Image (cartoon, helix red, strand yellow):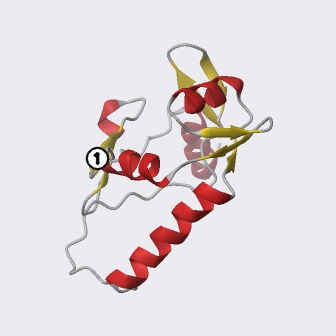
Amino acid sequence: MSETRRRRSRRRGAEPERAVQEILQPSLDLPLYHIATAEQTDLIHDMAVRILEEAGMAFYDDEALATLRAAGATVDGESVVRFDREMVEAAIAQTPATFEFIGRDRAHSVTVGGDNIVLAPVAGPPYALDLDNGRREG
């Protein structure tokens, strides 16, 4: 057996080395760059709220529709929900500046918001896991 064949056979039988993956969460150390003025940001916000008030959003889950109706939203027809400005502003006021996105392995959890940068696939997870239903499509 040649030296080359011996090396190949040893490689095949050996346990592959696994790369140690260290989770790093970069943070933004640069000054903020504003692409819109405060007036432009307010205009974007006002237009978004106007869309929620006038056009609404479609929801196709009966439980979600019942929850939104009980919270004070207007449900038109079978699925269109319209939100008044006060409801939207109250929801925004409750939003935390940061939150932890908890990984299956807690060592892989990341903080979203603030100066933290989170890099993730945009398409979303193929599966999700919840305590009530177990594994399901994402």
Quarter of the C terminus within the rendering:
top right
Which quarter of the picture shows residue 109?
Answer: top left
Check disc 1 and give the amino acid type: Pro
Residue 132 is situated, as x and y percent measured from the top left of the image, at 54, 13
> Please, what secondary structure does the residue beneath circle 1 have?
loop
Task: Name which quarter of the figure residue 126 lies in.
Answer: top right
> Which residue is pictured at 50% across the width and 31% down the height?
71
Q: Is residue 77 left or right of residue 5?
A: right
Q: Is residue 4 above or below residue 6?
A: below
In the image, is residue 55 above or below residue 98? below
Question: Residue at coordinates 28% horizontally, 59% vertically from top-left?
Answer: 116
Horizontally, residue 90 falls left or right of residue 128, namely left
Query: Residue at point 50% right, 38% down?
Result: 16
**Front residue of this view, candidates 28 and 14:** 28
In depth, the one of 110 and 43 nearer the eye is 43
Residue at the disc numbered 1: 96
Quarter of the image containing the N terminus? top right
Image check: 36 left or right of 33? Answer: right
Q: Is residue 78 above or below residue 81?
A: above
- Judge whether 68 appears above or below 6 on screen: above
Of residues 10 and 33, the one drawn nearer to the viewer in this rendering: 33
Q: Position of residue 73 (x, y in %)?
A: 57, 39
* Nearer to us in this view, 77 or 15: 77
Neighbours of disc 1 within 10 Å: few (<14), some (14-19), many (20+) = few
Residue lying furthest right: 78
Q: Position of residue 98 (x, y in %)?
A: 27, 49
